[in-house]
Image (spheres, rainbow, N blue to C red):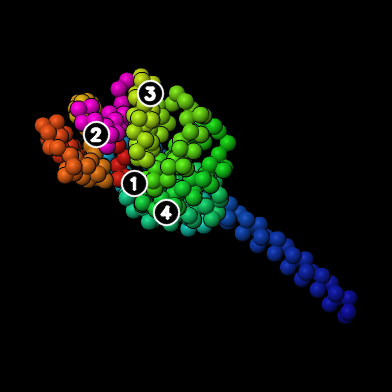
Amino acid sequence: MQLQVTEVNNKYDEIKKSTELFTEEFKEFKLEYKMRIAQSKYDEASDIMREIGRMEENTNCNKGESEKLLKQTRSFNEVKKLLFEAIELNPNFDKAYDKLARIFKKEKNLNKAIEYELKAIEINEQESYFSGLAEYYYHNFEYDNAIKYAKKSLEKQEYSRKKAFLETFIAYIYSLKNNERETIKYATQAIQKMPENPTVLSSCGCSYVNIKKFKQGIDLILKAKKQRIKEYPTDFYNLTEAYIFDKKYDKALETLKKYIEIQNKNICYGITINDYYKWSEELNSPEIEQTKTIEELKNLIEQLEKKDKEDEI
């Protein structure tokens, strides 16, 4: 009788072990299946985002009109739905959080963009997530946080070219905070890495203008302009601002006219609301004699389409 009980117990243990093994295998299979479904949803969302990107590049209109056209074809809501489903299946899917953050940024919901990029970083401290988060904080006027995460991205960045662009970005934010020492430090580092790159030169030129180093700023923007294969409207926009604040109004009028001429060929340009008020305040200063040049400048500025800060010129 004792022998039979032992055999039963042994049999029970064998069945229990095999059941537990099967359960674990089933759980692993189920998890792998969910991961694959999540990946497929992420891939589908990515395809739609690429389609949106192509449409933005090929649409000869301002960004607001471009997004209206996009939503008629492939709604951002469709992409978000797929990404939320992917996250439900795989809560640690950092790429899905990152892509959601980018969509929220496109929808100008910066608080949500920041929230989801932070979730992506909690899972995976990837360099591109830090730079994305820095950008969202910048557009949300949270400059200290923008600098903090741009520097984290810089620490993780291996390539000199990308380091230069990050340093350019950091220099620009410091210039908005009127921190001359840090502006010059990061702008110098960026230019040393890429002394002939027009994007780096032009942006660093703007940083110097922001800290009232007008000659250095204008020289850098002019150097950037020379490096271009064809005329680039942003150079004329930046030069206009530099000349206005350097009180060289004839040159400001000349560059603004050129900017408008190029803008008429591609209506994706205008003036940011922030710059509109800044330029207008400067030109309406009681210390400035209201000459014909000043009046013409103000009239042309009024004609420019006003854009949100996120719609970078």
Disc ID at residue 106? 1
Q: Where's residue 289, x and y in %?
A: 14, 37
* Residue 239: percent from left, percent from top: 29, 30
Tell me how far mark 3 sits from mark 4, CA to CA. Answer: 35 Å
Q: Residue at x 84, y 72 (%)?
A: 7
Q: Is residue 128 magenta?
A: no
* Segment colored magenta: 230-251
Question: Which is closer to the viewer, label 4 or label 1?
Answer: 4
Q: Quadrant of the C terminus?
A: top left
| Residue 250 highlighted magenta (yes or no) | yes
Q: Amino acid at mark 3?
A: Lys
Residue 40 visible in the current orientation: no
In this rendering, position of residue 168 left or right of residue 258: right
The mark that comes first in sequence, 3 or 4, is: 4
Q: Residues within 10 Å of mark 2 (few under 14, many from 20)?
A: some
Per the image, label 2 sits on a secondary structure element best described as loop
Mark 4, other Cα within 10 Å: few <14 / some 14–19 / many ≥20: many
Three-letter amino acid code of the residue under disc 2 = Lys
